[in-house]
Image (cartoon, grey):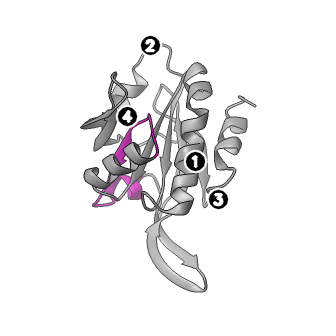
Amino acid sequence: MTRLAVGDTAPELQLDAVLPDPAGGTTTGTFSLSTELAVPGRKGVVVYFYPAAMTPGCTTEACDFRDSLAALQGAGYAVVGVSPDGVDKLARFAERDALTFPLASDPDHAVLEAFGAWGEKKNYGKTYVGVIRSTVVVAPDGTVAVAQYNVKATGHVARVRKALGLD
């Protein structure tokens, strides 16, 4: 598994997703990294990879991103969460926890693998293959500005904000 490093060109990300709608709910559609990067004034897109919607750690991380979303957006950053969960489960997750940023579905792990967020993990003495909790910030030119792998759910968003110079 190859991880991305600062300065690398980020792979395109175009996935089925749960998207926030203007009325405060959600809709389904396609999330495209290149489209999001092309938004005028965009400084980057925070792409975070998490193992499973509606689990304790992933809920903590998602809610931290939700709670920091205004500050991130105010600084010019968009946020998207990517997991192998299906769109239906992501829709329930977004509704349950009032998540107001896109959640993208990567059931075949192609994007997870391309970003280096799928691979061998160790947990409680067991080795298995799965999602490596990671965050990659992609700059408007498509290059990696921040790459963090094997992060902890708790306190991770604060570290991302610090890396972006927001705190």
Q: What residue is shown with label 1?
A: 5
Please state the extent of the stretch shown in magenta in the rendering: 97-114
- Precedes in sequence: disc 4 or disc 2: 4
Does residue 148 appear in the picture of this structure?
yes
Per the image, label 4 sits on a secondary structure element best described as helix
- Which circle, 3 or 2, is nearer the viewer? 3
Q: Is residue 112 magenta?
A: yes
Per the image, label 3 sits on a secondary structure element best described as loop
Q: Amino acid at mark 3?
A: Lys
Q: What residue is shown with label 4?
A: 33
- Which circle, 3 or 1, is nearer the viewer? 3
Q: What residue is shown with label 2?
A: 40
Please identify the quarter of the rendering in which residue 113 is found.
bottom left
- Precedes in sequence: disc 1 or disc 4: 1
> Where is 45 relative to 62, above or below?
above
Q: What's the distance in space between the residues labelled 1 and 4, CA to CA?
A: 18 Å
Q: What's the distance in space between the residues labelled 3 and 4, CA to CA?
A: 24 Å
Q: Amino acid at mark 1?
A: Ala
Q: What residue is shown with label 3?
A: 152
- Precedes in sequence: disc 3 or disc 4: 4
Per the image, label 1 sits on a secondary structure element best described as loop
Tell me if 115 is positioned left or right of 145 in this view. Answer: left
Q: What's the distance in space between the residues labelled 3 and 1, CA to CA?
A: 19 Å
> Where is 57 relative to 66, above or below?
below
